[in-house]
Amino acid sequence: MTAQTHAARLMQARDGALRLPLLTEVDPAFTLAQAYSVADETRALRIARGERPAGYKIGFTNRGIWPRYNVQAPIWAPVWDTTLTLLDGAHAEVSLRGLVQPRLEPEIVFGFASTPKPGATEAELTRCLSWVAHGVEIVHTHFDDWRFAAPDTVADFGLHGRLLVGPRAAVSEFVALGADLATLQLELHQGQSRVDGGQGSAVLDGPLNALRVWVDAMAAETPQWRINAGDVVTTGTLTDAWPMQAGQRWTTRLSDARLCGLLLEVVV
């Protein structure tokens, strides 16, 4: 199949919350390069119907979950004005409507003030940032049972469903942004039960380093996707990805008071 054919089928699946056979099973020779070509096509289709790119998600930065999901490196995909919510406070209601097999991922999110250059150091990259926040990405997949290869995930919108970003802290509040975020501790609760925990270093040794690695990788592999001032970029889950359903109440607690924990109530 052509990239255009794959893109049309994926858009149909997204709009109808449908499931699809794995692209890598339909075509065992399907590669990451081809997957990003499909992603280019779906990106163009979404822009053509009025959606606006609002930044990016970086996926699979947590090496601890690579064996479970059959991946060996990060991926990335656009975030959209239709999928991004910048919260005014720490509480939100979230609907799962239109999502297929949704899961929750607590992450660290950055806002860009200017375009970074490939090869930047962490200090140079920090100067391109305006804020940092804690957020939750809701990921989902149109492939059964969360079973796929990396090219499938890239083509499948990078598994991106929603991104909710909590109150933003100015980067200037941090003297050592990279080190502070690498040592950040997070607890994830569902109802009254603690279900998981993680540390910032889980994502490629820290969210700022994950961002640096991604800037270089995207410039090399998808140079047509630019990073612009105002873009929001989320850097990958600090815990495992947890299945979600209506009626649940999820909370996160963070060790750094400059970043706000979140309370999410899941509605139909």
Image (spheres, rainbow, N blue to C red):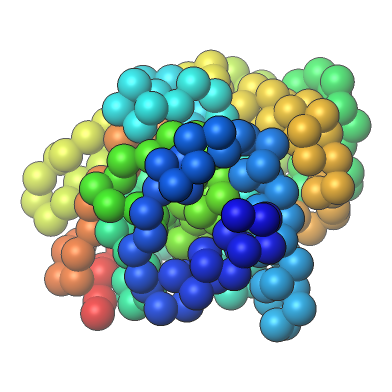
Q: Residue at x 49, y 21 (%)?
A: 72
Q: Is residue 132 visible?
A: no
Query: Is 81 in front, or is 258?
Result: 81
Q: Residue at x 47, y 70 (%)?
A: 14
Furthest toward the bottom, the residue is 49
**Residue 224 at x, y percent in the picture:** 86, 47
Q: Using the image, determine if residue 85 lies above or below residue 129.
A: below
Image quarter of the N terminus: bottom right
Image quarter of the C terminus: bottom left
Q: Using the image, determine if residue 120 lies above or below residue 170.
A: above
Q: Residue at x 69, y 36 (%)?
A: 33
Q: Using the image, determine if residue 219 lies above or below residue 259.
A: above
Query: Is 94 in front, or is 22?
Result: 22
Q: Which quarter of the picture shows residue 265?
A: bottom left
Q: Residue at x 16, y 39 (%)?
A: 195
Position of 121 with respect to 165 (left or right) is right
All told, the count of numbered labels is: 0
**Residue 176 at x, y percent in the picture:** 66, 22
**Residue 223 at x, y percent in the picture:** 85, 40
Q: Is residue 14 visible?
A: yes
**Residue 208 at x, y percent in the picture:** 64, 28
Q: Which quarter of the picture shows residue 254?
A: top left
Furthest toward the left, the residue is 192
Position of 216 with respect to 253 (left or right) is right
